Amino acid sequence: MHTRHYLFPVIAVLIWAINTIVSKMAVGVIDPAAISFYRWLLAGVLLALVFARPVWKQRDVVKPYLGKLFVLGMLGMVMYQCLAYIAAQTTTATNMGILASLMPLLAVGLSVLLLGEAPTVGGVFGGLVSLLGLGYLLSHGNPAALIAHGAAVGDGLMLLACLSYAGYGVLLKRWKIPLNNWHSLLIQVWCAVPVLFVYYLSQSAPPVTGAGLPLVLFAGIPASVIAPFLWMHGLAKLGPSRATTLMNLLPVFTVLIAMLFLGETLHSYDVIGGGVTLLGVVMVQYLKRPLRRATA
């Protein structure tokens, strides 16, 4: 396996990590409704310039799947992105990156519930390990305080955002829509844009200032178009297993960038809680033996 093939998905993960920092930088600079709407409007226009014609030629194939593509757009582009931007207002980029690393674990849990897949050793025990790490992280090293006072609002919203995106991935796998990845993405984006526009208007159409424009451009082009291209290339060359494992770099990149550019401090509970959480995710990815066989 050529090393250069790993470079594409690693750069994609780096871009998504930077985009988490962009979400935090957007606080107080641009309204969550504005960056959510303009980001996907920009991405949708760029994708349409390239893929609109071939998608139109397949309209008879697309039509039966429009409802499912709409649901995917709501989960991946509306709920996940809007919740993440709102979460950034009351949590740190470090926490957002660590919570995002839970998506593979959440996807495994949803696959058991929605797809009827058998629980695995890693899914059960890795899930328990991740929950312990997550509890330690969100309680700032004091689990009793988490039980007494609960988690921060931003952490809860980010966890809900990750659950939404995990559901997106599971449904995408279950439905097996017979479209090219880019064509499917284009339709999902344009299903999401009208909903995001309504959300934008409901917030009194907040403007995009000069300071907010670079954030929209980064979110709309590198994070929404370039990174998916690099990731799809990595999937094609490395296969899903190898490429998905590289997503474990997301919290590492996010924490390092947050320390360098946002001045966030890495505490001991970040290292311990984040490390234990990530260990659980790795167990999910590698310990795939069915739980029943292991028990027997």
Image: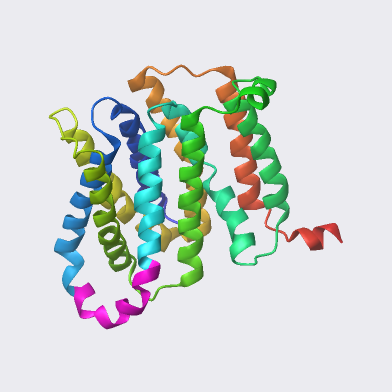
The foreground one among 289 and 212 is 212
Q: Residue furthest right?
A: 296
Query: Is residue 222 shown in magenta?
Result: no
Q: Residue furthest bottom?
A: 60
Query: Is residue 63 shown in magenta?
Result: yes
Q: Is residue 255 left or right of residue 270?
A: left
The foreground one among 56 and 90 is 90
Place of residue 226 in the rendered image (x, y in percent of width and height, measured from the top left): 27, 50
Residue 71 in the image: above or below residue 277 = below
Q: Residue at x 49, y 66 (%)?
A: 173
Looking at the image, what colour scheme do you see?
A: rainbow
The foreground one among 188 and 242 is 188
Q: Is residue 28 left or right of residue 258?
A: left
Residue 221 showing in the rendered view: no
Q: Residue at x 50, y 52 (%)?
A: 166
Place of residue 174 in the rendered image (x, y in percent of width and height, measured from the top left): 51, 69
Quadrant for the C terminus, please.
bottom right
Which range is magenta? 54-68
Place of residue 141 in the rendered image (x, y in percent of width and height, measured from the top left): 63, 20
The foreground one among 230 and 264 is 264
Residue 20 in the image: above or below residue 115 = above
Residue 127 in the image: above or below residue 64 = above
Instruction: Please identify the quarter of the rendering in which residue 258 is found.
Output: top left
Q: Is residue 150 left or right of residue 289?
A: left
**Numbered marks: total:** 0
Which is the main secondary structure of the residues drawn in magenta? helix
Residue 236 showing in the rendered view: yes
Q: Residue at x 45, y 33 (%)?
A: 96
Place of residue 102 in the rendered image (x, y in percent of width and height, measured from the top left): 55, 43
